Image: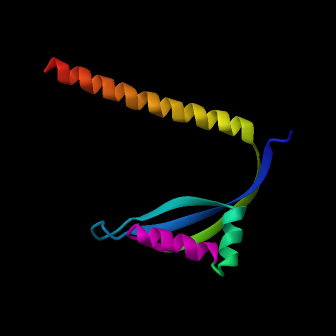
Amino acid sequence: MKTEKTINLTAYKVDYIDQREPKPRTVHAQTVVLDGGKISALNRLDMRPAGWITQQFERGGFTVSAIHKGETITACVDLAELWQQTAAAAELAETKKQLARVLGQLKEAEE
């Protein structure tokens, strides 16, 4: 059984300003990666990716000064391997929470 999926990823370089910083403000750069499904959904909503990215940054209190479309690459993802990695990461996160809880209880017992 085939457990691979091919996805298209497009990178956008976003230059933005944090309005909470005192003047003169620094122009920051961040790369935002969108997959083909997201871009297709935005097209169906009659939105361009740059407009959607700008909205997301503005919600966070930033002002976008420029967006540059970068490279588009195709990636082949093995879904079974991705599942194993994600499950292992979730198990590790849960173990860390439990360890922190136990350490907190031990610390309280010492006091």
Start-end of magenta stretch: 48-64
Question: For this rendering, which residue is in front, 83 or 42?
Answer: 83
Q: Is residue 76 magenta?
A: no
Using residue 8 as the reference point, say whether residue 66 is left or right of it: left
Residue 70: name its quadrant: bottom right
Q: Residue furthest top?
A: 110
Residue at 50% x, 30% y is 92
Residue 73, above or below 12: above
Q: Position of residue 87 (x, y in %)?
A: 59, 34
Q: Residue furthest bottom?
A: 46
Residue 110: name its quadrant: top left
Using residue 65 as the reference point, say whether residue 107 is left or right of it: left
Using residue 18 as the reference point, say whether residue 85 is left or right of it: right
Using residue 107 as the reference point, say whether residue 64 is left or right of it: right
| Secondary structure mostly taken by the magenta-highlighted segment of the chain | helix
Residue at 56% x, 73% y is 52
Residue at 27% x, 68% y is 22
- Please state, as top left, top right, bottom left or bottom right, where the N terminus lies in the image: top right
